[in-house]
Image: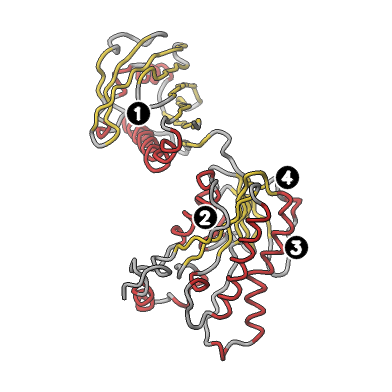
Amino acid sequence: MRLYRLHSKQQLPIAKEKAWSFLSDPANLKVITPDAMGFEILSGADKKMYAGQIIQYNVSPIAGIKTRWVTEITHVEKGTYFVDEQRYGPYALWHHKHFITATAQGVEMEDIIDYKIPFGWLGQLVHGLFIKKQLTTIFKYREDKLTSLFGTIEGAKNYLELKKYNDEKNILLIGGSHGIGLSIAKTLHENHNVFIASRTKEALEDLSITHIPFDALTDELDTSLLPDTLDGFVFCPGSINLKPFKMMSLDTFHEDMELNFFSMVKVVKSIISKMAENSSMVFFSTVAVGTGMPFHTSVAAAKGAIEGFAKSMAAEYAPKIRVNVIAPSLVNTPLAKRLLNNDKKIEMMSERHPLKRVGTPEDIAAISVFLLSDNSTWMTGQVVGVDGGMSSLNIN
């Protein structure tokens, strides 16, 4: 059963005494809780807060279904902090610390919630699909409500983070400045230590990442700039050379193989000793390897080499390292710009797919993040088709 933590901070332009008076009054919980939660105090809120106080609520977190929640106020230091703990309710553990600290411009309110979800792996799944988003929504509502009641401090930055304990990973992306790689970086950077080795970094300026200047075709990766261990590795560089075979020079085959395959192998050899126990590698292929398509001879050959390499690596390094491949169809990235540079082309390419659209970087990033996460610990040696149904459905 995993332990999660939600951590938030908000600054308000009010006196510490006023903040304490509002936040320590259980009746005000209803004011700062979304109406959709159906929050209703049943008993125990008729006195000022004290250690040992028991408060009963009804909440309706899912589809209006009422759930009883019983809380005990376990610790109180007047004007500074209090702690509430669930004694009965939907969580396996709920421990909520509230802190109020005076600042030069008012107060900083800090909440730290440590909690567990019951029902094992099913609870983890529900957390990822629903609970995490709901908690974030509740605290964002609270932030907005407190701002409307008490105002805001110009230039103040509020903070909200939700993560699993010991879930921070060291992840290396080769080529994370554009397209799919950039979407992966945007998804991962807030909760993990992300290292991006790429030629450019302009798109990464607002992300909390470590950038390493690197050209996959010409440079040797300086592994001294990486941590001692890596929990995840993603190789993003690729090419799309679509021409009739008779127009393909041998140099084109060499170039595609060099960029897609040999440069990848070179990097993998340089970092393989850093891969940690239970780590994950993610490579990219194409739907054209498993589904023969005209004009794809060069790129399909290069990506086919990746699939064979990945399966052999998965067998050789199991159970220490998981190795999986994502095989997308056409994705709307800068790499595919020539194929999708006007509405007519986008419409034509969309019609080729059973789901009637081309892929987005976010579509592929979501699967990549899943394969890097602990939710995929029983997957290795797989080629995952993320292709709008193209590889397995014929509806034309």
Distance, label 3 to label 4, CA atoms, is 18 Å
Q: Residues at badges 2 and 1 in contact (C-beta under 8 Å)? A: no
Q: Earlier in the sequence, mark 4 or mark 1?
A: 1
Horizontally, is 380 left or right of 275 in the view? Answer: left
Name the secondary structure under disc 1: helix
| Residue designated by label 4 | 228
Residue 267 shows which numbered tag? Answer: none
Q: On screen, 141 above or below 381?
A: above
| Residue designated by label 3 | 220
Q: On screen, 242 above or below 275?
A: below
Three-letter code, disc 4: Asp
- Near mark 3 (Cα within 10 A), the count class, few <14, some 14-19 or many ≥20, is few
Three-letter code, disc 2: Ser
| Residue designated by label 2 | 368
Residue 86 placement (x, y as % from top left): 39, 20
* Quadrant (top left/top right/bottom left/bottom right) for the C terminus: bottom left
Q: On screen, 18 above or below 248?
A: above
